[in-house]
């Protein structure tokens, strides 16, 4: 073999190695790109879920506040009803001895 042929063979060998390394790097990059795309899709799904959960939480809090207000209103009405019943019973009890004394 001549020196030129040897140099050409060596150069072709290095070129082949470089192409193989480039192939490996390209495959690795494709895998990374697929993984990144998958992560990006997952992130978008999580963001959508988060938005839905935030909306549901807001609705639940609003319902909780409405229930709390209704409970407060009902408690006030029950307290007034209890007072009215007590007043009526007290009034009836006060009238009873007087009625018994008359008979």
Image (cartoon, helix red, strand yellow):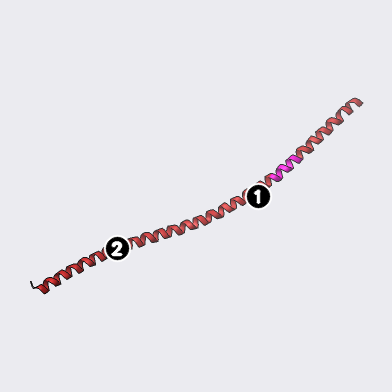
What residue does disc 2 label? Answer: 27
Q: Is residue 37 depicted above or below 58 in this figure?
A: below
Image point (42%, 60%), residue name: 40
Q: Under tag 1, what secondary structure?
A: helix
Q: Is residue 93 depicted above or below 72 in this figure?
A: above
The residue nearer to you, when weighing 91 against 31, is 31
Q: Is residue 60 depicted above or below 89 in this figure?
A: below
Image point (62%, 48%), residue name: 64
Give the left or right position of residue 59, taking residue 90 as reference.
left
What residue does disc 1 label? Answer: 66
Residue 20 figure quarter = bottom left
Magenta residues, as a range? 72-80
Q: Residues within 10 Å of mark 2 (few under 14, many from 20)?
A: few
Image point (82%, 32%), residue name: 90
The residue nearer to you, when weighing 61 against 3, is 3
Quadrant of the image for the C terminus? top right
Q: Residues within 10 Å of mark 1 (few under 14, many from 20)?
A: few
């Amino acid at each position: 073999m001549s020196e030129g042929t040897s140099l050409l063979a060596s150069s072709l060998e290095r070129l082949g190695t470089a192409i193989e390394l480039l192939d490996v790097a390209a495959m690795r990059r494709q895998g990374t790109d697929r993984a990144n795309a998958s992560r990006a899709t997952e992130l978008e799904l999580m963001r959508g879920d988060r938005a839905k959960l935030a909306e549901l939480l807001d609705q639940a809090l609003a319902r909780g506040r409405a229930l709390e207000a209704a409970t407060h209103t009902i408690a006030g009405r029950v307290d007034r009803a209890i007072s009215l019943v007590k007043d009526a019973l007290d009034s009836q009890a006060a009238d009873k001895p007087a009625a018994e004394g008359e008979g």
